[in-house]
């Protein structure tokens, strides 16, 4: 017996299987991440196709005998074509996707965060979009602190305190808990900006006034910290697309 159902979703990733088939990694707000089979798509011009980052209402079919979910049709809402217009945007989008896929779990908040970040990549400063996604995703996942107090000693940061980093904690920390001897530091103005962004909606985060040079330095700081903070290695960090 087969069961048809519909869900809002966005394509996080896709991989080829066998000769003509594709498996989509579909992020949904209410069903988590689904593996969706698309049969014959690499052979038949009539097969339904879903490109990377396509968001829409997906008509799916679940087969009771093997539990496989297959794609029936798509009513697209956005293709996020602007993401593919630069290598840097593609690099960020691939990183966001890999972080969500590696997290192994999702909900409506992660869905909103991910789709909002892709929207921001198309229309806003790429570095602002990256800071928004990374800071909020890591906070949702419990991998970053609140940027207002040291996660090691719990001391509240001073207004003008320069933060260090702890490899053991995988977090920015106060000067006294800095285990890298000032190798990875975050100035006070940058720390305050990240703290505000990590608590804000996408619209609010994009409206904060900050220099392009500063926002670029903060996004690269967060990239460096991901190598120490994220529980698995992220291949996107080695792609060379984000410089």
Image (tube, grey):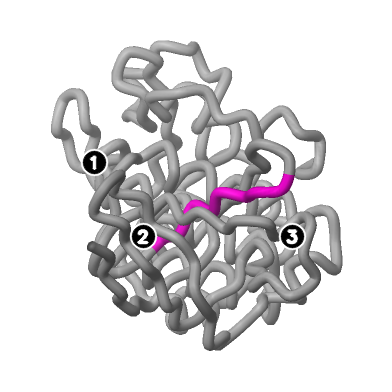
Image x and y of residue 163, in percent: 42, 33
Query: Residue farthest to the right?
Result: 86
Answer yes or no: is residue 147 visible: no
Q: Earlier in the sequence, mark 2 or mark 3?
A: 3
Location of mark 3 (residue)? 89
Which residue range is magenta in the image? 20-27
Q: Earlier in the sequence, mark 2 or mark 1?
A: 1
Which residue lies at the image location 64% right of the left edge and 58% below the top edge?
Answer: 215
Nearest to the eye among marks 2 and 3: give it: 3
- 73 inside magenta stretch: no
Location of mark 2 (residue)? 198
Task: Locate the C terminus by quadrant.
Answer: top right
| Mark 3 element type | helix
Decide which of 153, 72 is in the foreground and name it: 72
Location of mark 1 (residue)? 142
Q: Earlier in the sequence, mark 1 or mark 3?
A: 3
């Amino acid at each position: 017996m087969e069961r048809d159902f519909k869900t809002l979703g966005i394509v996080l990733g896709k991989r080829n299987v066998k000769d003509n088939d594709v498996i989509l990694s579909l992020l949904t707000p209410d069903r988590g991440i689904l593996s969706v089979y698309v049969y014959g798509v690499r052979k038949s011009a009539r097969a339904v196709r879903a490109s990377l980052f396509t968001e829409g209402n997906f008509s799916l079919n679940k087969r009771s005998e093997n539990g496989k979910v297959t794609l029936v049709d798509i009513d697209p809402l956005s293709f996020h074509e602007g993401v593919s217009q630069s290598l840097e945007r593609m690099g960020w989008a691939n990183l966001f996707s890999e972080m969500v896929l590696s997290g192994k779990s999702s909900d409506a908040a992660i869905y909103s965060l991910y789709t909002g970040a892709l929207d921001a990549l198309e229309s806003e400063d790429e570095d602002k979009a990256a800071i928004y996604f990374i800071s909020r995703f890591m906070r949702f996942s419990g991998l970053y602190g609140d940027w207002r107090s040291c996660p090691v000693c719990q001391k509240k940061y001073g207004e003008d305190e320069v933060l260090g980093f702890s490899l053991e904690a995988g977090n920015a920390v106060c000067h006294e808990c800095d285990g890298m001897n000032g190798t990875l530091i975050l100035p006070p103005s940058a720390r305050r900006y990240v703290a505000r962004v990590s608590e804000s909606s996408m619209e609010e985060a994009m409206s904060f006034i900050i220099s392009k040079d500063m926002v670029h330095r903060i996004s690269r700081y967060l990239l460096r910290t991901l190598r120490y903070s994220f529980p698995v290695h992220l291949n996107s960090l080695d792609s060379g697309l984000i410089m």
